[in-house]
Image (cartoon, helix red, strand yellow):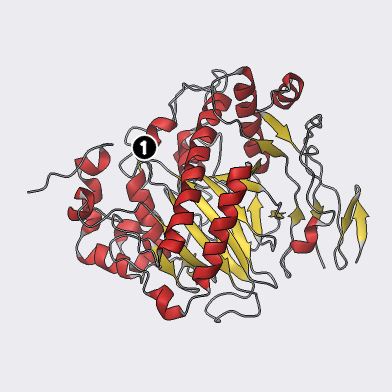
Amino acid sequence: MNAMELITRIRLPLSRAVGTGRARMGTATHAASSVAGMAIPPGFSAKEAKLTRLDTPQPPWRPVPAADPGTTMPPGFKAQVAQLITFEMPERVTGSTGDRALGKALVNAWRRDGIIQIAMSAEQRRLWEEAKAASRRFFRKPHAEKAACVDSQSYSGYIASGEEVTDGIADYSEIFTITKDLDMAEPRVRAKWPCHGPCPWPDVEMKEPMTRYNESLGTEGEKLLQLVEFGLEVAPGSLTRHTRDGWHHTRVLRFPPRNATNGKGKEGRGIGSHTDYGLLVISAQDEVGGLFIRRPSQDEKFANWERSAAGLKEDDDGWFYVPPVAGTHTVILGDMMQYLTRNYLTATPHKVGLNTRERFAFAYFHEPSFQAVLKPLEGGCGGNGLGSSSSSSSSSSSSSSSSSSSSSSSSSSSSPSVSDTEGVHYGTHFTNMFIRNYPDRITTRRLMAENRYSLLSSPELRTMGALPALP
């Protein structure tokens, strides 16, 4: 009996997969047809992909998305269109038989698809709607008001369209980043730790709904990690011990219509291909659509903590379009999850295309502590181990010509190989990613000018819970 069968048969009310079963996926090109019962929009042709099936869960299940999910795909892209199983999260994780089966099913889904879809609770839907409304209000403010929401010590705040760089090309995303909000009197801020500082909120009307939504997603992130521990068959706390005082943060995103950009980037490209840097990313998107992902493949090897994966396979075939489904979050995995599990779970390459209308989305990053030094997990997966050494998988990574090379040799796109003995310092990895993406931002300039980068090697910045010694 596989994990999904177990979840279905024990029929626990709070730990079940909902949906109509495994995806049917069609390859979109630019002629109307129907494949496997799924209508294909005019101007597209398709073929059914061969996929490993899971048994269709028994009722109750969540309805599938609209009959023509491909209609929301941004123009100019070729990709397979995915319908994902929607999992329902428990109110709390207790270690029950259902929790363990759900953990296995989640891990299997990530290993197969690179992404999972989870149902929002009624409370999360309310918080998402409030946060989305606050996002729309903010991005409609005059540019001067938005541009004032910048901090020189943290990477929180406003990022104009064209300011972010992925693989040396400007992205068209317009962003408000929310990192840990630390006031100027906080010891880590006074000690000038890299990336530590206040969040420059524009007003309370944005701060309050965003904070409530983030707190809800933080609870969801911890539950997901607990379930992943069961799915990997590692000891409880193997992952969650790294997230005490986690460096959780959010990117509030707006994408312009493809015909209304400022011309700084590449036509139709919202954000270039990349992997995210931490443990997992919980995202929500409006009804417009624009997200593309790559599924795990033995033929595609990368280790973004050693060599940048920015731009990876961006213009190649093999992408999957993830259509928006109301009332759900999607969850992908990041670099640190890949490193911890020795590639048993891999970070998900993804990119965003510009659509014919403006698009709003949220990406919440559930992260280790800034001070955490991560090392691969031992055992797991029924005693069969969690894969091979991480560094051996990076030889065929796509290199980045990102502007980071002009920022600092410390943050170059090709870093020294990481040994399992020394591990990966999350704070350094996070800082490198942001220096690479924002080479000209005031935060990057101040960090380098004041030599804050050198502090990343200090013992207190590599010991969880330690605080700086201040005079």
Residue at the left extreme? Answer: 471
Q: Is residue 15 left or right of residue 25?
A: left
Q: Horizontal and vertical percent for residue 425?
A: 33, 43
Per the image, label 1 sits on a secondary structure element best described as: loop
Q: Residue at x 29, y 54 (%)?
A: 196
Q: Residue at x 58, y 53 (%)?
A: 128
Q: To which residue does mark 1 refer?
A: 419
Q: Is residue 332 left or right of residue 185?
A: right
Residue 103 seen in this snapshot: yes
85 lies above or below 46: above
Q: Nearer the viewer, residue 308 or 91?
A: 91
Q: Quadrant of residue 146?
A: bottom left
Q: Quadrant of residue 241?
A: top left
Quarter holding the N terminus is top right
Q: Is residue 21 left or right of residue 330?
A: right
Q: How many marks?
A: 1
Q: Is residue 238 left or right of residue 96?
A: left
Q: Nearer the viewer, residue 90 or 395?
A: 90
Q: Nearer the viewer, residue 74 or 126?
A: 126
Q: What's under tag 1, amino acid-wise?
A: Ser
288 lies above or below 242: below
Q: Horizontal and vertical percent for residue 5?
A: 75, 24
271 lies above or below 141: above
